[in-house]
Image: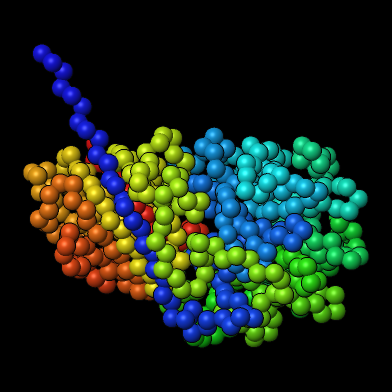
Amino acid sequence: MAEASAPAVPTARFSNFIYEGRDPVFAANKPEADEYQNPILAGFYPDPSLTRAGSDYYLVNSTFAYYPGIPVLHSTDLINWTQIGNVIDRPDMLDFDGLGLSRGVFAPTIEYHEGTFYVANTCVDCGGNFIVTATDPAGPWSDPIWLPEVGGIDPSVFFDEDGKVYVMNNDAPPGEPLYEGHRAIWLREVDPKTFQSIAEPTLLINGGVRIEEKPVWIEGPHIYKIGDWYYLSAAEGGTAVNHSQVVLRADNVLGPYEAYEGNPIMTQRHLPADRENPITSVGHADIAQDDAGNWWATFLGVRPYEGDYYNTGRETFLMPVRWEDGWPLIVTGDEEVKYKAQRPELPLSSRSNVPLNGNFTLTEDFSSGELPPHWMTLRVPKEQWYDFADGDVIITARADRLGEGGQPSLIARRQQHIYATATTTVTFNPVQSGDEAGLAVLQSDDYFYALGLNSMGDGTFAVTVRQKAGAEENPYGEVVAEQSVDMSSGEPLDLRITADGDAYDFFYRLPDGEWQMLLDDADGKILSTRTAGGFVGATFGLYAETSE
């Protein structure tokens, strides 16, 4: 008797992906020729770190358990940025298997020194602190140089003028913590080539600038040598609404450091929560001096659509730094972080063909035959399950499904606007019941919507919306809307998801037909950090999966 042949593996062909952002606050604050618009990187671009190399500026952000990890962006004017690569872009560099989506690579810092770029980072629950290097910031970057003696998170590197090199980091305080969130900033001298410790660590900050007030989560440290002073800047208060930035200085890199009496040098936590179009949770700043001698700060912030609800994640903002009595100040008193401000006096960067701020419509292009650098997968692929042909992306359906916490067949890009639309056309040949392909909007493994074309197992098809709104639910979520569709196998189907703040609408369109609403006013708050937790923002993704 002949052996039964294995069932064919279904594949989904996506022939386009169109993203549209239409935030009213961007339209109302369109910059003039001598202005720029905040955020400079809209959507899930948290924990920015900035460095200058000649007349060029480079910036990196956290990506947690998304892959490739740690985008590298380039600009000549600090306003218009182009992604030139990713630091973590080889599958064997780091292992994110089994990690929650908000673990992995936290808070990278980038430095340039004598022709080499350095990124220091933490792989949380996957190895600890490490440094990678490159002579070209577009890559390739070295394999991780692990720092086993450096605990905690948020490492950064400081190159002193005398040739000594230091690593600083957030870690536990000396002795028993005095309260929840009590942390410390430590500094140690390291070997300039191996980055291994060659001296005992020195305590720079214990708790925060006013330990009697029990400050929490001192983190994200940077040291800058400016004139005769060493300036130490760090975030305080946690990365939510109480976030802030503080500064201290010393005449010796090892301290002792004196805190600025007017700290914090940036926060928005004291401003009215009901102010119009608020920018909140600002902090985690890094500063750099431009060619004209002016100083600028990049930092993270969020744009809630209600209370502390936001789906776009923590974004990257830019503000000028002013100096008063020898101290750098960013936003003080009742000053608000601005949606537009006077631009730096720098040569204009060419605007990227992938816009990163303001309102825009972008038709994604897969014609290069490789995944564009701003597209990501959940965790690190162990096999090749996507390919390209004739400008389309072809995704193989696999049994690793959305919601399981594994490595599903999904490629995703950031939701960058509170009001956004994602549209795609999929051609899918499901083999059996449970085969599904379509368009998802995802905040984590436990909070997402999936709009997909399904086989009903009898030669008929349906379009469904699947919702998962918590870890205790069915791991794949529940079908909350379904419509059988009269179409032949191999016909293209248009799918669309529209975000309007906390309301998401789901549509489909048959060949030569009109758009049909499948589900309207779905609860978008399940895609917010406030509901889902973690540190990431929502992403739109193209996926294909099978139940077997």
Q: Is residue 347 above or below residue 339?
A: above
Instruction: Give the residue at the far left of this rendering.
Output: 458
Tell which of 238 and 18 is nearer to you: 18
Residue at the image point whose x is 31% and y is 51% from the top: 14
Tell which of 210 and 118 is nearer to you: 118
Residue 158 rendering spot, x and y as whole percentages:
79, 53
Q: Quadrant of residue 522?
A: bottom left
Which quadrant does the N terminus fall into? top left
Q: Quadrant of residue 239?
A: bottom right
Instruction: Give the residue at the far front of this rendering.
Output: 390
Tell which of 268 and 494 is nearer to you: 494
Can residue 162 be seen here? yes
Count up the numbered dots: 0
Q: Is residue 381 above or below residue 243?
A: above
Residue at the image point whose x is 51% and y is 46% from the top: 68
Residue at the image point whose x is 72% and y is 48% from the top: 117
On screen, residue 67 versus residue 542, left or right, reads right
Residue 119 rendering spot, x and y as whole percentages:
67, 49
Residue at the image point whose x is 57% and y is 56% from the top: 83
Residue 138 rendering spot, x and y as whole percentages:
62, 48
Color encoding of the figure = rainbow
Q: Quadrant of residue 317?
A: bottom right
On screen, residue 439 versus residue 158, left or right, reads left
Can residue 167 be seen here? no
Residue 125 rendering spot, x and y as whole percentages:
55, 43
Which quadrant does the C terminus fall into? top left
On screen, residue 481 versus residue 224, left or right, reads left
